[in-house]
Amino acid sequence: MESTPKASYTPAAIEEKWQQTWLELGLDKTNQDPTKPKFYALSMFPYPSGSLHMGHVRNYTITDVIARLKKMQGYRVLHPMGWDAFGLPAENAAIDRGVPPAQWTYKNIDQMKQQLKRLGLSLDWDAELATCSPDYYKWTQWIFLQFLEAGLAYQKEAAVNWDPIDQTVLANEQVDSEGRSWRSGAIVERKLLRQWFLKITDYAEELLNDLDKLPGWPERVKVMQANWIGKSTGAYLEFPIVGLDEKIAVYTTRPDTVYGVSYVVLAPEHPLTQLVTTSDQKTAVEAFIKEVSNQSELERTAEDKPKRGIPTGGKAINPFTGEEVPIWIADYVLYEYGTGAVMGVPAHDVRDFKFAKEQNLPIKVVIVPEIGADENLKSAYTEPGILVNSGEFNGINSIDAKKAITEYAEKQNIGKLRVQYRLRDWLISRQRYWGAPIPVIHCPECGIVPVPEKDLPVQLPEEIELSGRGGSPLAQLESWVNVPCPSCGNPAKRETDTMDTFIDSSWYFLRFTDATNAEKIFDGGRVNDWMPVDQYVGGIEHAILHLLYSRFFTKVLRDRGLLNFDEPFQKLLTQGMVQGLTYMNPKKSGKDKWIPSNLVDANNPVDPQTGEPLERVYATMSKSKGNGVAPEYVINKYGIDTARMFILFKAPPEKDLEWDEADVEGQFRFLNRVWRLVTDYAAAGVCKKQADLDQLSKEEKDLRRAIHLAIQAITEDVEEEYQFNTAISELMKLSNALTDAKCNNSPIYAEGILTLVIMLAPFAPHIADELWHLLGNKGTVHTQVWPSFDPAALIADEITLVIQIMGKTRGAIQVPSQLDKVEMEKYARESEVAKRYIEGKEIKKAIVVPGKLVNFVLG
């Protein structure tokens, strides 16, 4: 199997050989030795679409470098991989192809697994999991039952996006900007359905506060999560309805404006809407409600859409003034948010001002910038100020008035202080087949009955027809639906909703710690040993939902006594996107503006259809833009190690990466230089002598200093911030120092060659192992200890001392590095450089910067 030392660098042969060797050595299996410190390195697991793209390659390469490095630094490392395999895309693909979703999914998994293996990643495939496998979703269902038992899972009526043709619920993302279903094209309706929820709001405060426990997360992600949770402190106020015993509850963060309320708005679907509507408004209100029900939530709340509403004819009483104000309904108020009602204060809210102007409603100023200010507004005044027209609160500044008015409301029993969150409970019901069935049974006698643990998993039936239409596929399979109640034995029915796939990905990182355990979800000792994940790597697009849900699950399972930690991910790296050179026709819109690269002459970029000139931009690689580069193309042409080196060198991990084949070739040339450098040395004979550090020549000292500077710099680059691009730059510097060195037969040169190969290993693992082998070493470079630098080696015998005259550099001399300021000045004065410029002139003073320069100021 050995190559001859002078063989040329052939990536394909080397990479295949070493991957096979690593497999035989069991190199990537997880070391469970408890005497070693642990390190859990994890990439966000992929959806098995069937093919890897460059974004995948970048994500997994970054994590792989970290995992390999930590092993060399003496850690036992868990570095697993799995598949986020349930969901609507697989179900739709299976329908389109007339095959079962399981068949489609597992075929894609096999294909992507082979692609991943070709990348030479140090993954422990013994820990592999797929969320669609019954031995995984058994435990997903078990977790749901934990939530149910804890009172954190419940059913309630909820307004959903309903496709009247496909007879199914759609997520907001599945409704286009015109309010149509992405699949059937039907106008989407809003419909009340009984749905399952998880009470994430019970953990809102802890999820917010514990962001402070995550110094290893990007600040941007923490801010996004905090905004999503959306904590606000305000007042809950009740407006009595004229002629009824009912009250309209509103929540406001601006109780200081309550004297300026000129109307109250209900969500069209609010239960009070029917009660407050007068007979003369009934027809108009019903028509408006029907019209609004055809709009998606996104459409109703879009900032750029006009706000539409209609009076109900009913009136409410402002409890602070006793005035009657009209009750309206409007499309921008949603029943699921807040109390489903808002108070309209047009003078001090931009949206209310616009709405009041359009509907000719009164605008009453109650806050002004200063006493005596003009109360005629051209736009809403939303800044702090002084209260006017506000009864006993006149003259108080608006900040103090918030507190005073809220306290007054509590004393008068018309309101109270309330902390509220933007976060809503998590709707997890999906009316589709390819997901984990919710493990409950509905019994006419017993109500909701959990499926007994011994009967888990509730498996998806295989003999089922999928059309994508007609509601839940499971609901149509009577043989599956109809079961005896586990509690009383009477006829009952299974729950036919399946779970949102975010459930599957909210705990997978826990299962990886004990992936093959058939008896328990995981062993407590093992999960508490490996968790939390030390380094999590994935896209910024998961900053909110996936990461928030994972934190929520961790806290619930902790409270159930299953875990002993608060947060799942210690450090988070959100890698940037991979961008490709893209051609765009600025005169076209939508998807049509992107022109695939293969249709464009790079020397004359014009639209092949219209002949119009095209703009060249870098944009995220995607099929729709036709700007993608297949990983196979790069690997076949340059090898895996080159692809890895380019990805790591081109940009810091958190920044977007612009794909440029010239830079790929640059890394290929560098690896070839390293190959020649090491193989030439191996061919000349590897130096076996021990270095006598007290007897080194100047050249040897300089080279040793370059070696240990490289060790220091690369270790710092990869240790904390993962600046792999600068680490590779340091490898290049070391390679250049070895190339230029004249002491090729010295043990210091041998140390340099060995150090270069060892430090190259996490970045380009295949070529490093081959070179390690060619140097006559046994085993694999990846089990070597990461080198540490010798501080003594960094101290130079000589330094370059710059000589300046009147602040202008005139030359430099070599001097011993240990000189004090007096000695430095003496060396400088006696130098030929100084003598040339100072002769015949008086030196007024000498400015000495130790270790750097001497500046002579002349008289």
Image (cartoon, rainbow, N blue to C red):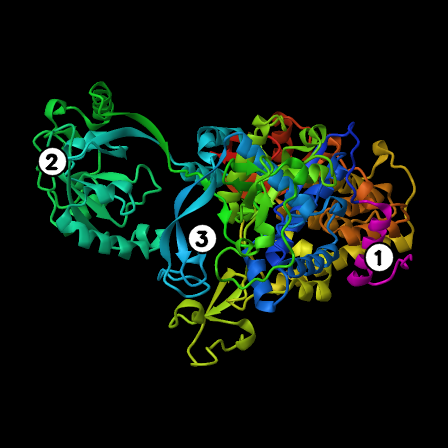
> Which residue occupies the extreme top position in the image?
411
Element under disc 2? strand
Give the side of residue 323 with respect to residue 857, left or right: left
Residue located at (51% from left, 39% from top): 548
- Report how far apart the C-alphas of labels 1 and 3 lie in the structure: 47 Å
* Residue at the disc numbered 1: 17
The 10 Å Cα crowd at callout 1, few under 14, some 14 to 19, many 20 or more, is some
- Report how far apart the C-alphas of labels 1 and 2 lie in the structure: 84 Å
Q: Can you say which quadrant of the picture contains the N terminus? A: bottom right
- Magenta highlight on residue 47: no
The magenta span reads 1-27
* Residue at the disc numbered 2: 324
397, above or below 183, in the image: above
Q: Position of residue 690 (x, y in %)?
A: 90, 37
337, above or below 666, in the image: above
Q: Position of residue 394 (x, y in %)?
A: 12, 25
Q: Nearer the viewer, residue 351 or 372?
A: 351
Q: Are marks 3 and 2 in contact (CB under 8 Å)?
A: no
Give the side of residue 289 with respect to residue 807, left or right: left
> In the rendered structure, which disc, 1 or 3, sits on the residue that comes first in sequence?
1
